[in-house]
Structures are given as C-alpha cells and as structure tokens.
C-alpha cells in the first residue's frame, strides 16, 4: 500500500514545474495518469481488506451495507478506509482533533455503490436486499502527499484554496474494473467521465469544516441530516409527528386562540404586506389544536408570503411593494422578489480585493461583463451555456453540477436563479462576510459552520428575517407550432404563466436573442423566530406534471407516449420505476450526450396534501377573480420544524427556548413536518425507487430542510453559490 501511494504521488507531480509549488495544478493529461493508476489499484481488490468506515449503519452483519438515497451513489453502499483515514476518523469522533478538520496526506476513502437488480426485461423489480444487489460503481476520495487541485477548481475562493479541498474525486464503473464493456453502456460511461468531477466537487464543497467528508458533517453541524436519506422503510411519516415535542404552555384563552387561528387560516385577502412570523407558537398549536391545524397555519402563511412577494415592486426601491398599485399589475412590472439581490451582485470571488461592504441595496442591477446586447428591452439576462453564472442561467439543479439539465416537452431549457432579501444582504456585507479573502463554501472564514442569519425577531428594521428565493424559468414556445394550446399566442401565455422577456446570450458566438421565459417553480425560505431552521415553502405551476399514479396524465414536463431510452436501466446508480415508460424522475439527460435536448419525464411522487389543497383553493379562487396568472400556481407544501422555538413563561415574560441543544447532533435537530418535500422542477431528480410490498414505487428521498441542513452555514448554500460564482460585472 505504501509503495502504491508513493507511485501515485510520483505520477501526480511528474508533470509539474516544481515540487515546491504549494499546489499541484493538474491538467487533463496528468489527471488521466492518476485516474489510471487508481483504476489499476482497484482492480487488485486489496482495499476490501481495509476497515469499514467507523460506526456505519449496518443492514446486516455479513454485508455491512448502508442504505442511501442519493442519485449518484447506489441504493446501498459499503465504505472502506485505509489505516491513515480510519485512525483520523476515530480520533475525530472522540473529540481529539481540532476543527476545522484536515485529513492526513495519504488518506483513502473508497465507497462501493450497489444497485438493486432488475430482470433483463426491465419490468420486474427484485427486492433490494443483500442477496439481490449488484456492484455498479466505485467512488473514492484520495488525498495525495502534496496539495492537489484540479485546474478548473483552483483559486475559486480565498485566492488559493480548492473548491472541494485537496482531494482527488474518483468515479469508476464496475465494468471498467472488470474489463467487461457492453454497449450501450460504454457511451454512458464516456459522458459521465466528462462531468462527474464537477458533480462530486459541488456536492462535497459545503463540508468545509469536515475536510469535505460529508459523513462527518454531524460532528460540527447541528443541522446535519446525514441519516435522513431514502430508506425504503422510512418513507412514511413516523409516529413522531403525532407526538408533542414539548410540554407547551396552554393558551390563556383556548377558545379565542382557536378562533383567531381559524380566522387567519381562512383569510385569503390579497395583501402587499409581507407577514412576519406565523401568528402563534407552533408548539402550542400542535399540542392544543393538532397537527392538521398547525400545517394549515403554515400553508396559509406560505400563501400570504407568496402573494406579498409577487406584488408589483416600487420603482427605485428594491424589495418594496408599490402600495398604490393593485396586485394584477405585476404582469407588466417586476415583482418584489424579482428585485432582490442575486449572488453575483454581492460576491466576486475572482477579484482578490473585492469587498461590497459599501454597496447600496438600491443600486441598479448591473449587467454582466461581455453582454453587449443588454440594451435590448428585457427583464433579465441568461446565458446559452453554463460556463458562467448569471441571473437565471443556472441550468443545473441542486448538486447536479453544470450538466443536470431539465428539458420540457417542447425541448426548451429550464434555468434557475437565487436571490436574497435586504435583511440577508445587510448581514452578508457586514463584517467582511462577502469579501473574497474570507469566502468558504460554509460561510466566511472564522464563521464557517457558525453563521447565524437574523430571524424575524432579530430583524428589528424590516421584520422579514433572512429570506432566500430560488426560481425556475422555462423558455416558452409561443406560436401555432407549439404543442401546448395555452401558448399559441403570447396573450394566451400571459394568462397562464408569469412571463418575462430575457436576453439569451451565447457566450461562444457573442450573439443575443430575446426570448419569453415562464415561471414554473418558486422556492421561498424564511428564517423566523419560531423556526430558526427556517420555514420552507415551495410553489410550482399546476400544469407542470401529473401525479405518478396517473398513467395517462400529461404536463409541461411529462408525455405518456414518450419512448423509453434503451439504456434507461443500465445506469447503476439511478432508480427508475420499471412500470412507467420514459424513465420518469431520472436525470438521464445529463449523462447521455445524445439526449442533450431530449425531453425529461417528470411526475409528482407525492400527492398535494389535503391541507395545502384547501389553502390553494382559497387563494386560487381570489386570484382567478383578478384574472391573475398566479391563479395557476399551487403550493406543493410548507415544511417547518417541530423543534423550533417556543414561548415559555418563567416569571419574566416570554423567552426563547430552542430544543436543539448544543450537544444534540444529527437527526435530533431535524424533527420536521413533512418528512419529505420536493418541487418537481427544482428537485426533479431527488427521487429513488423502492420495492414496497411487491409494488414498485418512486419516492422523494429528501426535503428542503434535510438538504440544506448539510450546508454548514445556517441552512444556506449562499456561500457555496458565492465561491463558484463566475459572473464578472462590467464595472465592479
């Protein structure tokens, strides 16, 4: 083993100008040397004699495999570590290692990723257990004996560090190791090899304080949710939601308390006023009125927030509603949330001395450098490629890298944007938190994994608390040749969608074209007093997708007649539903070059809950009377923490009490309702296949809170967006 590590190191540095360089900058050629050397080592199969990752969750003693639900890793994984890494992990778990963690040089972590077997016809699932799994891919982390950094990720923040650390991220197909190449699998492999590095790095980057080893997140991050992945036996809501997390004090007047809350829930008045927190202590509501009423309260809160954020914005005042205008005028004017700050305005990681501490909130939104055609009438600018980030140009979904595309049935691309409100903006520019010299994926230096955004009580000026928005826009097909009857004309399209005009900028040619963009999804996250783990609200267009059980259903992103690719079941780390054609909810496109513009197949895996349906109906009726396109949007669900803060009387009045103690790690801090939540166009591929009582089913395998719980920055990925930000301003 020692000989092997030395040999790899020699290969690594052989092509470098100097052994004394702080970083080994790796190009395509010498990366291939390292890749090939590691492949040879895996073929020797000596690593299977190593120790298993300490404290792994074991399904059974003979196989010692852990169930996962992440799309790149298999249904089951078995993780091996060499002695260097094992000893370090053990010391870390004992609290004998200083933070932030830094694995010793020579550390190896190798993960075998298993998939469930499916018969040759692809129609009959075999129950996934230790006897019916197949090794599909092997992934690894290797830390060379010298700082390692792939060229594309070097210097992305701090002027020196690598996004994803000093690790080599390896991804190997079992067919490679066995030397058994089979068509059409080989073409799939080639496509994956071209992209998987970015995918690995993007996913691991938030693990800054644990040296990017995400399994150790819960050691430093109390919001880590590493074990809340897609276990087949954990899809149903547990009895936890039917228990009371606190002994909440009784309302002084329970009848008045109930009546007041019912009035709040049933009130669908359109208002420009962004609500502060929910109107009552959720723990009191939960204990004395029940889980259903509590959920209705949060759903009503979500819709009231949605309406206020979509009010027309006052000219010259970003993030402020024009109180003199009615709600319907937002079809021609920017909404409140559209004027929030995008990351590229605040973060410029490629400018070493950048510090926006004196940046004004109401400064006009700048135009990215290089876009010469931005004088054309438009609402925002997007790019044709993903080489740079810009407003709404993030073509990849969460942890999908730059290649996780979503294509509708017209063959049109979906793009994403991330923005934040004034409260969060002022927090970001204070204390040099947005200065390039202080950037890390988990927060500013000195505060990584310790970020604490203002909540609605801390935010004494705006009363909004920190707020983040993620929107999904699809390029509209408008005209008589389009498939949708609702987009035959622009007039018809504007009745169905919130439509904006974008400048589509092609970086390669320098050309521009205007294009109509339709809003198809909207995430709203707010940190409130009662919910320090944030309230997570997600909306989408009602015509996006059908329910998975609706075999004849249609939608913007689903066609029951779409033919299934031949290689749908060949990918070893993805889990399609064998009973539904077209590989629904499986991100085939990003791995198959030939499917770059091929429509994706999406379905809704979980029906809209009864509570959300009730509130949707209330607001849709009001909006329909206003002839607003927002009458076509629905709340998928609102997620909230059962273990947030509660009001407690101790003789000195109401005080804050947070049930997530400093010593409570991992899942203890994630008592959330609902357990799983997924927006079909924003988290399209966070789904997994399970054989439930003989019937194949797909399930959402994560949620807003559980995913963001691994961010390491108070449940925000804003710094991860920041360090990978590539948009240069015309006049910084």
Image: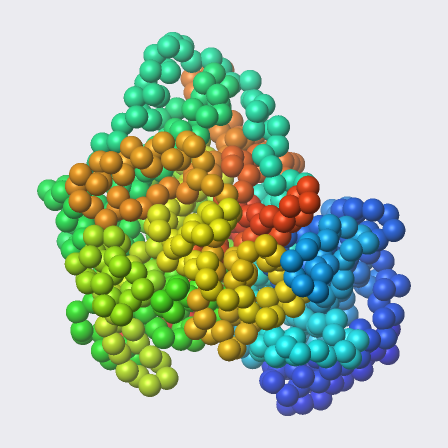
Q: Nearer the viewer, residue 512 or 626?
A: 626
Residue 86: percent from left, percent from top:
80, 58
**Residue drawn at x 46%, y 62% as measured from the top left:** 561
Residue 555: percent from left, percent from top:
38, 55
**Which quarter of the figure is the C terminus placed in?**
bottom left
Which residue appears farthest toward the left when viewing the image? 324
**Residue drawn at x 32%, y 46% as measured from the top left:** 633
Q: Is residue 374 left or right of residue 118?
A: left
Q: Nearer the viewer, residue 181 or 619?
A: 181
**Which quarter of the figure is the N terminus placed in?**
bottom right
Compared to 111, does 667 lie above or below? Answer: above
Q: Nearer the viewer, residue 721 or 395?
A: 395
Compared to 19, does 164 lie above or below? Answer: above
Q: Is residue 646 left or right of residue 95?
A: left
Residue 100: percent from left, percent from top:
64, 55
Quarter residue 566 falls in: bottom right
Quarter residue 456 falls in: top left
Q: Nearer the viewer, residue 679 or 458?
A: 679
Decide if residue 464 is in sight here.
Answer: yes
Residue 85: percent from left, percent from top:
78, 61
């Amino acid at each position: 083993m020692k000989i092997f590590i030395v040999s790899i190191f020699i290969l690594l540095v052989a092509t470098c100008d100097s052994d004394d360089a702080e970083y080994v900058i790796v190009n395509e050629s010498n990366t291939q040397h390292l890749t090939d050397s590691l492949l040879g080592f895996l073929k020797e199969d000596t690593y299977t004699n190593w120790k298993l990752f300490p404290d792994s969750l074991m399904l059974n003693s003979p196989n010692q495999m852990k169930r996962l639900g992440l799309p790149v890793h298999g249904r089951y994984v078995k993780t091996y570590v060499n002695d260097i890494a094992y000893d370090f992990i053990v010391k870390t778990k004992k609290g004998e290692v200083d933070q932030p963690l830094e694995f010793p040089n020579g550390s190896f972590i190798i993960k075998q990723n298993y998939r469930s077997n499916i018969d040759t016809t692809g129609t009959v699932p075999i129950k996934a257990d230790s006897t019916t799994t197949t090794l599909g891919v092997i992934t690894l982390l290797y830390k060379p004996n010298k700082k390692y950094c792939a060229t594309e990720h070097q210097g992305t923040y701090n002027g020196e560090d690598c996004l994803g650390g000093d690790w080599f991220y390896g991804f190997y197909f079992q067919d490679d190791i066995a030397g058994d190449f089979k068509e059409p699998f080989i073409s799939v492999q080639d496509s994956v090899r071209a992209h998987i590095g970015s995918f690995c790095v993007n996913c691991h980057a938030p693990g800054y304080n644990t040296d990017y080893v995400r399994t150790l997140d819960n050691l430093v991050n109390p919001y880590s949710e590493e074990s809340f992945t897609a276990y087949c036996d954990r899809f149903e809501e547990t009895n936890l939601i039917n228990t009371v997390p606190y002994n909440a004090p009784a309302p002084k007047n329970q009848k008045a308390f109930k009546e007041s809350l019912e009035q709040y829930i049933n009130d669908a008045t359109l208002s420009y006023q962004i609500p502060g927190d929910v109107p009552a202590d959720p723990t009191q509501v939960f204990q004395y009125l029940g889980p259903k009423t509590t959920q209705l309260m949060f759903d009503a809160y979500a819709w009231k927030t949605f309406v206020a954020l979509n009010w027309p914005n006052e000219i010259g005042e970003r993030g402020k509603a024009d109180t003199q205008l009615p709600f319907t005028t937002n079809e021609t004017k920017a909404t409140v949330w559209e004027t929030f700050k995008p990351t590229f305005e605040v973060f410029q990681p490629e400018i070493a001395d950048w510090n926006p501490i004196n940046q004004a909130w109401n400064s006009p939104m700048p135009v990215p450098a290089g876009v010469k055609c931005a004088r054309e009438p438009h609402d925002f600018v997007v790019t044709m490629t993903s080489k740079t980030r810009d407003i709404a140009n993030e073509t990849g979904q969460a942890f999908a890298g730059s290649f996780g595309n979503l294509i509708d049935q017209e063959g049109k691309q979906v793009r994403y944007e991330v923005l934040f409100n004034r409260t969060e903006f002022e927090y970001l520019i204070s204390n040099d938190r947005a200065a390039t010299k202080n950037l890390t994926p988990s927060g500013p230096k000195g505060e990584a994994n310790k970020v604490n955004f203002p909540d609605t009580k801390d935010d004494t000026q705006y009363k909004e608390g920190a707020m983040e928005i993620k929107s999904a826009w699809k390029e509209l097909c408008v005209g008589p040749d389009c498939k949708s009857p609702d987009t035959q004309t622009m007039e018809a399209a504007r009745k169905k969608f919130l439509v904006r005009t974008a400048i589509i900028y092609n970086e390669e040619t320098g050309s521009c074209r205007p294009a109509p963009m339709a809003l198809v999804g909207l995430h709203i996250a707010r940190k409130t007093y009662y919910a320090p783990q944030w309230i997570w609200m997600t909306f989408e267009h009602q015509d996006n997708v059908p329910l998975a059980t609706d075999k004849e259903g249609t939608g913007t992103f689903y066609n029951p007649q779409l033919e299934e690719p031949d290689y749908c079941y060949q990918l070893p780390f993805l889990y399609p539903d064998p009973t539904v054609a077209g590989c629904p909810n499986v991100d085939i496109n990003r791995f198959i070059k030939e499917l770059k513009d091929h429509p994706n197949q999406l379905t809704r895996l979980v029906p809209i809950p009864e509570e959300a349906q009730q509130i949707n109906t209330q607001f849709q009726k009001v909006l329909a009377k206003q002839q607003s396109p927002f009458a076509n949007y629905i709340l998928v669900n609102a997620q909230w923490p059962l273990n947030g803060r509660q009001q407690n009387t101790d003789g000195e009045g109401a005080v804050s009490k947070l049930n997530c103690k400093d010593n409570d790690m991992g899942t203890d801090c994630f008592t959330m309702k609902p357990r799983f939540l997924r927006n079909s166009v924003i988290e399209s591929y966070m789904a997994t296949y399970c054989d439930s009582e003989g019937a194949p089913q797909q399930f959402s395998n994560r949620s807003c809170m559980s995913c963001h719980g691994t961010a390491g920055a108070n449940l925000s990925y804003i710094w991860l967006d920041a360090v990978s930000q590539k948009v240069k301003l015309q006049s910084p």
